[in-house]
Amino acid sequence: MTAVADYSEKIPNNVDLHEDRRLQRALESWQPNFLNWWESMGPTLPTEDVYLRTAVNVGREGWAHFGHVAMKDYRWGIFLAERDLDRQIAFGQHKGEPAWQKVPGEYRADLQRLIVIQGDTEPASVEQQRNLGATAPSLYDLRNLFQVNVEEGRHLWAMVYLLHAYFGREGREEAEELLHRNSGSEDSPRILGAFNEETPDWLSFFMFTYFTDRDGKYQLGTLKESAFDPLSRTCEFMLKEEAHHMMVGTTGVDRVVQRTVELMLEHDDEEVAARGGIPLSVIQKYLNFHYSVSLDLFGSETSTNVANYYTAGIKGRWMEERRKDDHKLTDDSIHVDALIDGEIGQNEVSALVGLNTDLRREYISDCEGGVKRWNKLLESAGLSQRLALPHVAFNRKVGAYSGIEASPSGEKLSAGDWERRKGEWLPTDVDKTHVRSLMQPVHERGKIAAWIAPPRQGINGRPFDYDYVHLR
Ligand SMILES: [Fe+2]
Ligand SMILES: [Fe+2]
């Protein structure tokens, strides 16, 4: 295995693609379709070039190269984290056996399904974000948007590589389908609900990269544990790139809150909308929306499919190896959210069946970190207002609470009360129109829109006023 990509090849990779002519040809024939998809469904703002990070290596130091590149010439490559020759399966009935280098026949369909579902989210988010460039608050933000976009494109490549290399003709057909489904499409939508919602403004973008990309981080974390070693290594490397996407979301919301705080302090009231800011109450509503639709991505509280995936070794838990138990869970139990006589409550089930709940809880405690950070900004400004994650029963479309309505504090509501009050908790048309009215592009070097504070740091040691993007 070579660790450094060969950029003279059509498809940069560290998987010795040239040694497998058939696979190489198959991927080379998928490549123009990918580029067509990028041209027709990718970013719409015309640019000359963008200061982007490109993955060139998977080693500990210096895995990425930074430079101005035309986005259509971006080198989307195939990178797997380095192979550990002694890697053993860490959980389930095959625990202690060597990791699989090929797909076992009995798990083929399940593995393919998991890879397709993960793969489908990657181009979906590019489609959701395609028009945001036109309203970027600064060149720095514009560059970050495009960085996230090209890397989601690379993540699509990562999943397509696995489909082509390990799943034969069916895998190749699925790879084509990944380009044919589109976010929000009537006839062939993306597989998961949150990936068919639009991302119409930058507050949504930051909330999406904070909450929804973070769901991706947790899904990748479970696939990184997979006994199927190529999937594990692929996800390990993707997680490295995801860290930047999380950073864009976390600091993006930081900066919106920061600016709102400044405007609140200047005038000693909450009426920041009239002064070009986003009111804290609106930030809270966006947070409520993105958090609740992201909770849905974890599926039902209980799932026999997921129990089977775990026992089979194809999908583990978040930080599997750090867990202090037998990694088989056959005798363990967990309390999961449930409706008990129609009321919000909990139910005890077998730990295996409750694995979706386990993952969702890891995710929730991670999300609490963001809220803490944003509240620190309010606190250190001497303001008494706080942001909060809504209750898990709030605005759910999937799982135990999908059949009821609840307030952000977890109080069950009648359908009528929900209809009357939901505008207090979710963005209304008035809120959305206001947020969108603020989305005037600032494409001038070193300048920034009035609704958001500048970042503390630029990218790769460059200053905020660097020429991150050259527009056409
Ligand atoms: Fe991704
Ligand atoms: Fe991402």
Image (tube, rainbow, N blue to C red):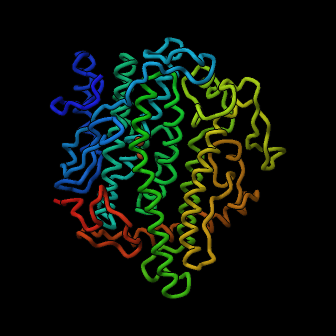
Residue depicted at x 41% and y 50%? 245
Quadrant assignment for the N terminus: top left
State whether residue 123 is above or below residue 15.
below
| Above or below, 362 relative to 158 | below
Q: Nearer the viewer, residue 9 or 402?
A: 9
Residue 18 place in picture, x, y as percent: 22, 20
Q: In x, y percent, where is residue 416?
A: 72, 61
Quadrant the C terminus occupies? bottom left
Q: Is residue 27 visible?
A: yes
Look at 54% across and 33% down and name the residue there.
Answer: 222
Q: Is residue 8 left or right of residue 118?
A: left
Quadrant assignment for ligand 2: top left
The quarter of the displayed image where residue 414 is located = bottom right
In the rendered view, tell whether residue 232 sits above or below residue 97: below
Measured as percent of width and height from the top left, residue 457 is found at 35, 63
Kindly give the residue lying farthest to the top in the view shown. Answer: 105
Image coordinates of residue 26 in percent, x first then y, are: 26, 21
In this view of the protein, which residue sits in the foreground, 128 or 23? Answer: 23
Question: Which residue is at 37% across, 41% downward?
Answer: 123
